[in-house]
């Protein structure tokens, strides 16, 4: 049933044969040291992309013999997930530059920026390059991380018997520019007092919500 003895070449031949019918190959500028296979499902993209309000990106790792990591773009429809397309990549020789995965993901997601103009909510996976790529391509949407991954991360950090790192507001601001770069624990400048109070309230509300989720799930409290 293979079109070639090499499974990757076989998959590419199959996609090329079906391109324009059931799938559409997404052209991506490949980076040195990384190989990409990306395509959209025409039926689901054509019928639902413009109606999509929630868009998710989820990935798998170590699920095939060729070593490709696969990600899928999922649209929400009446509380069900509809796959719109797939993105597969693998490091070929270890020479890929830092951030290469994010760059090619930007090209892949740019296709869905055009196809899904009404997206309001983004649900990225826990992988940092996927989160950054979604933030770059969909900057005006609300990004929601998985509660399970958030609570698991908190549990892992609290379980470590080491002192926490010192907070650096400037470093935090470089990553998320909505953070007040002048804020420090226990210090509130006159001009930023209201902002500091609001930030503290938001943090308390966020932690409270996470604890409520944990208590309802029967997990040990933080």
Image (spheres, rainbow, N blue to C red):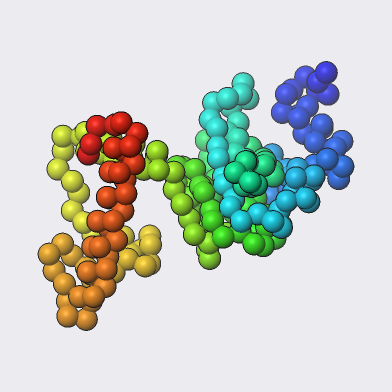
Query: Is 145 positioned to the left or the right of 117 in the image?
Result: left
Residue at 26% of width from left, 73% of height from top?
A: 195
Is 199 placed above or below 208 here? below
Quadrant of res 179: bottom left
Say which residue appears at 87% left-offset and 42% top-offset.
21
* Residue at image point 83% right, 24% down: 3
- Where residue 51 sits in the image (x, y, percent)? 69, 56
Q: Is residue 164 rendered to the left or right of residue 6? A: left
The location of residue 131, given as percent across then percent down, is 48, 50
Q: Position of residue 65 (x, y in %)?
A: 62, 21
Q: Left or right: 76 with respect to 200?
A: right
Comparing 210 with 190, the one in front is: 210
Nearest the eye: 218 or 159: 218
Q: How many marks?
A: 0
**Image quarter of residue 63:** top right
Regarding residue 91, the answer to whether it shows in the image is: no
Instruction: Specify whether residue 131 is in view.
Output: yes
Asked whether 144 or 64 is in front, the reply is 144
Quadrant where the C terminus sits is: top left
The relative height of residue 185 versus residue 125 in the rendered view (above or below) is below
Q: Is residue 204 left or right of residue 100?
A: left
Q: Residue at x 73, y 24 (%)?
A: 7
In the rendered image, which quarter contains the N terminus?
top right
As drawn, which residue projects farthest toward the bottom? Answer: 191
Q: Position of residue 107 (x, y in %)?
A: 64, 53
Q: Quadrant of residue 159?
A: top left
């Amino acid at each position: 049933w293979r079109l070639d003895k090499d499974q990757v070449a076989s998959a590419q031949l199959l996609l090329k044969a079906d391109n324009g019918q059931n799938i559409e190959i997404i052209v991506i500028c490949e980076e040195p040291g990384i190989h990409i296979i990306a395509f959209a499902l025409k039926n689901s993209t054509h019928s639902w992309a413009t109606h999509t309000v929630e868009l998710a990106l989820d990935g798998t790792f170590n699920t095939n013999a060729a070593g490709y990591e696969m990600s899928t773009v999922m649209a929400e429809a009446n509380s069900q997930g509809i796959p719109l397309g797939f993105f597969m990549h693998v490091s070929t020789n270890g020479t890929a530059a830092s951030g290469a995965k994010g760059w090619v993901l930007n090209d892949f997601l740019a296709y869905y920026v055009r196809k899904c103009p009404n997206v309001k909510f983004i649900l990225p996976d826990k992988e940092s390059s996927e989160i950054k790529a979604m933030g770059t391509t969909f900057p005006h949407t609300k990004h929601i991380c998985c509660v399970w991954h958030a609570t698991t991360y908190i549990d892992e950090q609290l379980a470590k018997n080491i002192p926490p790192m010192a907070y650096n507001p400037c470093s935090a601001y470089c990553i998320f520019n909505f953070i007040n770069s002048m804020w420090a624990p226990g210090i509130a400048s006159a001009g930023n007092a209201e902002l500091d109070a609001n930030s503290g309230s938001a943090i308390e509300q966020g932690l409270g919500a996470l604890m409520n989720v944990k208590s309802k799930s029967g997990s040990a409290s933080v």
